[in-house]
Image (spheres, grey):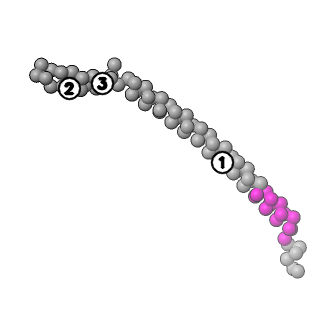
């Protein structure tokens, strides 16, 4: 045919293989960054739980009765 000498099929093959390889490498890079973000999020959640636990431990509740016999519940920090 007249266009056989215009198109270099080896070049088309190499471009296609290069696109597949580059796509796979980009997939690996994206997976790596996603995993790093998940690890960071997990550590932040652990830190938040630790702070909440310390805050709950720090809050103190006590009950008082005044002279008229009314009970009052107080909540405060140590």
Q: Nearer the viewer, residue 50 or 44?
A: 50
Secondary structure mostly seen in magenta is helix
View extreme (left): residue:
68
Q: What is the x, y in percent for residue 75?
A: 28, 26
For the C terminus, the image quarter is top left
For label 2, the residue is: 72
- Mark 1 Cα shell of 10 Å, populated few (<14), some (14-19), many (≥20): few
Q: Which callout, 1 or 2, points to the residue nearer the camera?
A: 2
Q: Which residue does the image show at 89% across and 73% down from the upper left?
A: 5
Image quadrant assignment for residue 13:
bottom right
Reading the image, the residue beneath label 3 is: 61
Element under disc 3: strand
Question: What x and y, as percent, mark residue 54?
Answer: 43, 25
- Foreground pick, 11 / 46: 46
**Residue at coordinates 76% horizontally, 57% vertically from top-left?**
20
Residue at which label 1 appears: 30
* Residues at marks 1 and 2, CA–CA distance in whole angstroms: 57 Å
Q: How many marks?
A: 3
SS state under label 1: helix
The residue furthest bottom is 1
Residue extent of the magenta highlight? 7-20
Left or right: residue 57 compared with residue 10: left
Mark 1 or mark 2: name the one nearer the start of the chain.
1
Which image quarter is the N terminus in? bottom right
């Amino acid at each position: 045919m007249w266009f056989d000498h215009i198109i270099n099929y080896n070049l088309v093959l190499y471009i296609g293989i290069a696109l597949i390889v580059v796509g796979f490498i980009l997939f690996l890079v994206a997976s790596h960054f996603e995993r790093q973000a998940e690890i960071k999020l997990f550590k932040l959640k652990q830190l938040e739980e630790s702070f909440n636990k310390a805050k709950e431990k720090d809050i103190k509740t006590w009950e008082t009765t005044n002279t008229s016999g009314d009970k009052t519940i107080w909540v405060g920090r140590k």
